[in-house]
Image: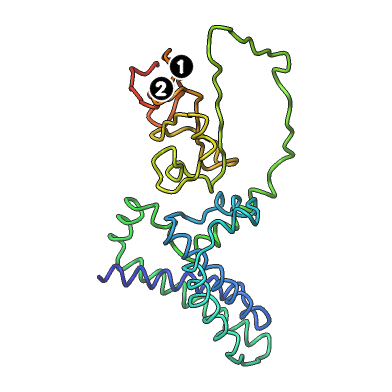
Amino acid sequence: MVFLLSLALVLWATTALILTILSTRWTVKFFIIIILLMSSMTGYFMDTYHVVIDDDMIRNMLQTDVHEAMDLFSFKQVLYFVFLGLLPSYIVYKVPLKIRAIHINLFKQLKQVLLLLLIIALSVFFSFGHYSTFVREHKPLRYMANPSYWIYSIGNYISATMNVSEFIVQRIGTDAKVIKSPNSLPKIVIMVVGEATRADHFSLNGYAKETTPNSKKKHLSTSPTYTLVGLLQLCQYLVCFLSIPSPNTTTKKAYKPKMSWTYSTTQETSLYYGETTTQTPKV
């Protein structure tokens, strides 16, 4: 219990330290209101979808269009925004500020920064054993700190975006040709890329709501247990479908495509009517 109180104090002092450094009498309300509004939405997505708002998620958010964003809209989101964002922001907006000379404000800010640093240092010092274990064994929990982590992630995103060199797309393998065999059925691979597309929300994988009617008409089989390697800079999830005749079709000839790839457990897997069988991985 003592450690939890100390941790809460450290998080509060860290947030106050960030606001103290960034704020002036002209910007203090602006920063607080922005943090309240964004933290309400951050809290909603973290609580509802169990995600963390890191620099990759910020990149996804900036690349999401209005249609995708509206798919995530809900009444619960409105409640979060109103009671945790708008109402506290209105209270902050109505609080009058005391106007002081600039040198007096700077001196008070310096004292406040030193006091907050002292609070953080003493809290960590008196519970150092707990903090060392906590940081070593529970690193992912720092991702859940709201608002400090999403503020840190915005800084990471800006730094990574500004330091990226020009991206040049070069065509390779332009002389490659597809050789069709008359005795084999065509294989079709569809990759659905996007952080708003989740394999557990496809009706082909057993989801109650009909979300893939066109794919079902084509008798596609899926492998919902796969985890594919993807590029974090470009996508969050990959969903693959194979054009395999399903058991309820009238096709008499069984078609067993051989397909393998390296995924998170470095195993090689073959597919047959959506069933998976683990084989000895190649080294």
Q: Which residue is mark 1?
A: 257
Along the line of sight, which residue is nearer the eye, 178 or 64?
A: 178
- Residue 257 or residue 260, whichever sits in front: 257
Q: CA distance from mark 1 to mark 2?
A: 7 Å
Q: Which residue is at the front of the view, 119 or 277?
A: 277
Secondary structure of residue under mark 2 = strand
Question: The residue under label 1 is which amino acid type?
Answer: Pro
Task: Say the numbered circle drawn on residue 270.
Answer: none
Q: Is residue 137 left or right of residue 23?
A: left
Locate residue 225, reporting x and y percent.
38, 34
Residue 35, x across and y down, in percent: 56, 71
Where is 239 relative to 93, above or below?
above
| Residue that carries the numbered disc 2 in the rendered image | 271
Residue drawn at x 67%, y 49% as measured from the top left:
161
* Residue beneath the point at 48% across and 29% down: 220
Residue ID at (42%, 31%): 223
Q: Is residue 130 above or below residue 55?
A: below
Q: How is the image coloured?
A: rainbow
Q: Position of residue 139 (x, y in %)?
A: 38, 52
Q: Which class describes the residues within 10 Å of circle 1: few (<14), some (14-19), or many (20+)?
A: some
